[in-house]
Image (tube, rainbow, N blue to C red):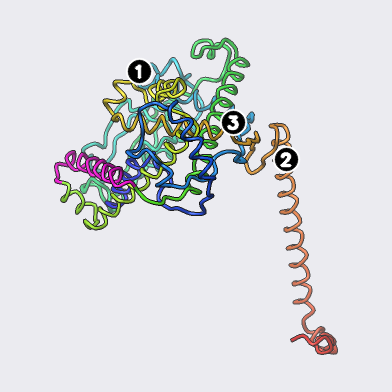
Amino acid sequence: MKKRIYLAMLVACFALTATACSDRGAVVTDDTKAEKQAEGKKAEAGSTRLVSVDNVDKYITIGEYKGLILDNTVDAITDDDVQSQIDQELQDKAISLRQAGAQDLCRAKVSEGAKEGDLVTVNYTGTIDGQTFDGGTANNYDFVIGDGQMFTEFEDGVTGMKKGDTKEIQIDFPSDYGDSTLAGKTAVYKVTVQNVRRTAELTDEWVAKNTDYTTVDEYKEGVRSKLEADAKQSAQEVLKNTAWSTVLENSEVKEYPQEDIDGAVSEFKKSMELYAKQADMTLEEFISSQGISQDDFDEQCQQYAEGKVKQNLIVQGIMDAEGLSLDDKESLQLQEKLVKQMGAGNLAELVGTYGQDYVDESVGLLRVEDFIISNASVSDKISNGDTTAEDAEAAVQNSGQDAEDESADQDMSETDESIDQDASETDESDGEDVQDEPDVDEDLESELGTE
């Protein structure tokens, strides 16, 4: 468990470096051409750099980053997706109003038996061997059936009860229960239901009161548009990651600039020292608490440093070759976008929280990802489950056909099994007659040379 905590922190520190350290399958670029481009365009570049060296080509061979063939696959949004989102929003609204003490605004009292998702108010008294116990009694206690707030046996017992109903529910506390006075014991709860409230139905009235829309149809269309926008955004992030990973994996480091490696190692150690300080430990004590050796920690430092420096070499190399800069208009726009994405009030706040290097490296990576994608051959596709097509309608139709084919295959499989079973039963019932017949099958096998 401790190693998992440590590795989680390592991943957090290593976020920008993606897959990082291995140098596999490099595609060698035309160094002469790259040098000429770099010489002609470096003058256009700004002064902010991600690496300490001027000649990036000396340290890394960058994989081909122009003309990549990529798919931009967006998930299709179905009616079921829309309804599921609406159901969730209804539930979320009910919970938020309940927490604010306004249950009646989001749920209607019902006289029916309670079911999953209902907000139930109960009085209960628990006893063990006929005696009450601390924490076993409550009045006007609210919980939602299915939320897991109560023991499953308790929720199951209340399910189906109506307002005014009283019932005894038995709970067997596990032997490892946190309260030792209850662990391994059986309690009987006398429960009386005070109220059953159910999430409001989706109506024009509810929509007008709780959303920015006026009708159910408008609301559904708005939810669909939001889900489609989210799906496109998610696909764009996947596209960027794929583009970057392709270049990263096909780039090969020749030599690591020692100054950059030393700086990254120091950065990693400072991050771990901060975690150690928060745990009121020295770095050495923290490392030991994570179940790793000093040698293991030093190796992790080196891996982080090499991954980070490799990324920065690639980003800076592409920016040099293409005349891009961290100081140009596009990069400054990405900087502002990053401020919003990270929830910072302004650039100064972002830098103060994460550091200037983090901001520069993030902007540089975003800048290069955008450049790679703009120079790639990108095919837009729609995905519906395991089915991918050129448009949403085709994806849905193909998905439906796949489901039909799977169902048909299942039916055929069941038919074959039925036939085999019938044949087996027939053979068993006629076993004696078969044994009395001439052994024709054995003679035939002998002629064919089978065993």
Separation of residues labelled 2 and 3 (CA atoms): 18 Å
Percent across and percent down for residue 376 are: 60, 36
Please name which of the two marks, 2 or 1, marks the residue nearer to the observer.
2
Q: Which residue is mark 1?
A: 101
Does 406 sit above or below residue 413? above
Percent across and percent down for residue 282 are: 14, 46
Percent across and percent down for residue 87 are: 53, 27
As for residue 267 lying within the magenta part, the answer is yes
Badge 3 marks a residue whose secondary structure is: helix
Residue range highlighted in magenta: 257-282
Badge 1 marks a residue whose secondary structure is: loop
Q: As rendered, which of 182 and 376 lies closer to the eye?
A: 376
Q: As rendered, which of 11 and 203 lies closer to the eye?
A: 11
Does 155 sit above or below residue 105? below
Amino acid type indicated by mark 1 = Gly
- Residue visible at 48% across and 33% down? 368
Task: Decide whether the magenta segment is chiefly helix, strand or loop.
Answer: helix
Quadrant (top left/top right/bottom left/bottom right) for the C terminus: bottom right
The answer to whether one can see residue 114 in this image is no
Give residue 399's quadrant in the image.
top right
Please name which of the two marks, 1 or 3, marks the residue nearer to the observer.
3
Q: Which mark is residue 398?
A: 2
- Residue visible at 59% across and 21% down? 225
As for residue 88 lying within the magenta part, the answer is no
Q: Would you say the residues marked 2 and 1 are in contact, meaning their CB atoms lie under 8 Å apart? A: no
Q: Which residue is mark 3?
A: 81
Taking the image as shown, residue 339 lies to the left or right of residue 224, namely left
